[in-house]
Structure formats: structure tokens, C-alpha cells
């Protein structure tokens, strides 16, 4: 196979670190060409640093520019050098949570023409020729409009890219077995959007283990992922549930990431459900 090339399509700065940081760091360390495309600047994010509170959209509306720098630091932590914003920085705006006025902004990604947005991604596919693409499922993992739109745009781009389309497409996923184990590890986290949830079936995500296609062991890069999460300090406070689970659960929580296979042929795997251990499995 030609040089390994893998494309990650994410909605906001910080999603790359939370969902796929260990996988990105692992493939970058292994010498693959790792491309990150982020669709918005995350202008509508909730700000967790008091000193930056006035950057919010309703006031100075400068959060996007700040998060751009946070993302640069996160990419440096992950060893990822090829990062782009879809259509260029500022082309598409964070749409905010579903049902909020930000959905209607003239540049909101949620309102973007899917084919036009996909064309920007097709151009990147033609350039970096990824054998593998990673993005979200049709629900955007948890229902955020920009994540849903990132899914639509990424999948449409793969349709339009012809021979330059990725051979395999994965969607990030959390196995129900991991979710169940994680609930107990939430401990005393003060920033916990799942407070009160004691049953894994009540989460807005979670995939039956037999539907998972790949388990990527990035344990060696767990520290890079944690550093990338800390780079997004405006969004992820040190008291976040992410760090709580990481502290209580062990490196595996940060270091191992899971995916379902949306397109392409599944390669050889291991374990009860034959999970692939490499997103390029079967392509070499
Ligand atoms: Zn996001």
C-alpha cells in the first residue's frame, strides 16, 4: 500500500481530542499522514475559564479565535501537523445546541449547503488521498447539530470523491460495556453532564459491543491525549468528568478508542467480536 493516510472530520475544536485523540496520536507516531478537518471554530461553546467569560458569543464573540489557538496546541500535543478548517477558518460557524437561535446564524454550519461543504472536503481527499476516514454516526454521536452536519458532509464527500474516496469509513462509538464500567468511575467530578444517570441505557450514546468493528489501542499515547484535552482549557475544566474517569478508570479510558465500520470491508480482528486492532486492517 502507498503511504498510510487517515482523515478525521470533527465538528468543533476539542472533539478531536475527546473522541479520537489517542488514535490520532498513535497513527501520527507511526508515521501515517494524519489530517484533521474541523468544521467550525466552536464559537458557541460554554466558557469554563472565568477570565475569558466575556469572549462569549453574546458579548465580545471572540471565542472562536481563542479556540483556534487551543486547537493548534492540542494538535501539537497529538503530533498532528496537518490541520485545516473546512472551507478555511471562519467559513462555517458553530450552530450551538439544537433549537437555539445560533442554529439560524447566516454562517451556521447546520444551515450549510451539504454539497457545497462537501466540495471543500473532496478537495482535501484529492490532495491527501486518505485510505481511511473517521467521523460521527448519523446522530452525530450525541445529537449536536454540528456533529450531525459533519456526518452528512463527510459521507457526502466520500460519495463525491470517486477514486479518491476513503476505502474504509469509521464512526466513533462507545461500547455499552465500556459505558457501564465508566459510570462507576465518574466519582466526584463536578462537571458531569451525566450526573444522576446510573443506567448505561439512559445515555444518549452507547453501542452494543457486537456492533463495534475496531478497538484501537493508543495506551502508549494516553498522555498525549490528556495533554490535548488540557489544551482545550476554555472548554474542558480540570474538574471535568473526562479527567475524573481517567483518574479512576486507568489509562485504558483515555487510551483505547472504539469505532463502527460504516463503509469498506472489515479486516481481520481479535476477541469475542473480532474487533480490528488497526483501522487500516485488510488494506495492506
Ligand atoms: Zn463538538
Image (cartoon, rainbow, N blue to C red):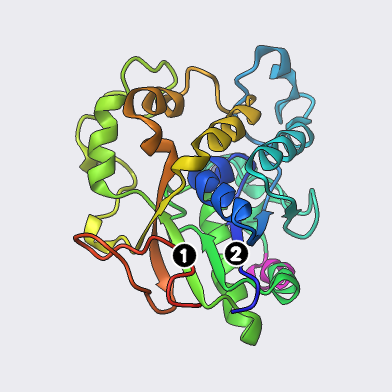
Quarter occupied by residue 262: bottom left
Vertical placement of residue 15 versus 111, above or below = above
Q: What residue lies at 19% left-to-right and 35% top-to-bottom? A: 199
Choose top left, top right, bottom left or bottom right for residue 282.
bottom left
Residue 50 location in percent, x, y? 66, 13
Q: Characterize the local packing of mark 2: few (<14), some (14-19) or many (20 or more) Cα atoms within 10 angstroms.
A: many
Query: Considering only vertical position in the picture, is 22 above or below 227?
Result: below
| Residue in front for this viewpoint, 226 or 114 | 226
Q: Are marks 1 and 2 in contact (CB under 8 Å)?
A: yes
SS at mark 2? strand
Q: Which residue is mark 2?
A: 6
Is residue 159 part of the magenta span, yes or no?
Answer: no
Could you say whether the residue bearing mark 1 is in a helix, strand or loop? loop
Q: Earlier in the sequence, mark 1 or mark 2?
A: 2
What's the residue at 30%, 48% (across, down)?
Answer: 206
Question: Measured from the top left, where is residue 106 in percent x and y?
Answer: 74, 52
| Magenta stretch bounds | 113-120
Residue tagged by mark 1?
279
What residue lies at 68% left-to-right and 43% top-to-bottom? 75
Measure the alpha-carbon separation of dots 1 and 2.
9 Å
Residue 194 at x, y percent in the picture: 34, 29
Image quadrant in which the N terminus is located: bottom right
Against 119, residue 83 (above or below) is: above
Q: Position of residue 3 (x, y in %)?
A: 65, 72
Q: In the depicted view, which residue is nearer to us: 242 or 142?
A: 242
Left/right placement of residue 166 relative to residue 180 reads right
Q: Main secondary structure of the magenta part?
A: helix
Instruction: For ligand 1, give the image quadrant.
Output: top right
Amino acid at each position: 500500500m502507498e503511504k498510510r493516510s487517515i482523515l478525521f472530520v470533527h465538528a468543533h475544536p476539542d472533539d478531536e481530542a475527546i473522541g479520537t485523540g489517542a488514535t490520532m496520536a498513535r497513527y501520527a507516531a507511526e508515521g501515517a499522514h494524519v489530517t484533521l478537518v474541523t468544521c467550525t471554530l466552536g464559537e458557541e461553546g460554554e466558557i469554563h475559564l472565568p477570565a475569558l467569560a466575556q469572549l462569549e458569543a453574546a458579548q465580545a464573540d471572540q471565542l472562536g479565535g481563542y479556540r483556534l489557538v487551543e486547537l493548534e496546541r492540542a494538535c501539537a500535543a497529538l503530533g498532528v501537523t496537518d490541520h485545516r478548517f473546512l472551507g478555511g477558518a471562519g467559513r462555517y460557524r458553530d450552530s450551538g445546541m439544537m433549537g437555539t437561535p445560533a442554529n439560524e446564524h447566516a454562517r451556521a454550519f447546520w444551515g450549510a449547503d451539504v454539497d457545497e461543504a462537501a466540495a471543500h472536503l473532496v478537495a482535501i481527499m484529492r490532495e491527501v488521498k486518505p485510505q481511511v476516514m473517521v467521523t460521527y454516526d448519523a446522530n452525530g454521536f450525541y445529537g449536536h447539530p454540528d456533529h450531525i452536519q459533519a456526518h452528512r458532509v463527510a459521507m457526502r464527500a466520500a460519495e463525491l470523491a470517486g477514486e479518491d474516496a476513503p476505502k474504509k469509513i469509521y464512526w466513533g462509538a462507545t461500547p455499552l460495556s465500556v459505558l457501564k464500567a465508566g459510570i462507576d468511575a465518574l466519582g466526584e467530578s463536578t462537571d458531569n453532564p451525566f450526573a444522576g444517570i446510573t443506567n448505561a441505557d439512559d445515555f444518549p450514546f452507547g453501542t452494543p459491543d457486537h456492533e463495534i468493528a475496531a478497538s484501537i489501542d493508543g495506551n502508549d499515547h494516553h498522555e498525549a491525549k490528556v495533554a490535548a484535552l488540557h489544551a482545550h482549557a476554555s472548554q474542558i475544566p480540570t474538574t471535568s468528568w473526562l479527567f475524573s474517569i481517567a483518574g479512576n478508570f486507568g489509562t485504558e479510558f483515555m487510551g483505547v478508542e472504539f469505532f463502527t465500520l460504516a463503509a469498506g470491508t472489515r479486516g481481520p480482528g481479535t476477541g469475542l467480536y473480532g474487533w480490528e486492532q488497526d483501522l487500516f486492517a485488510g488494506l495492506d
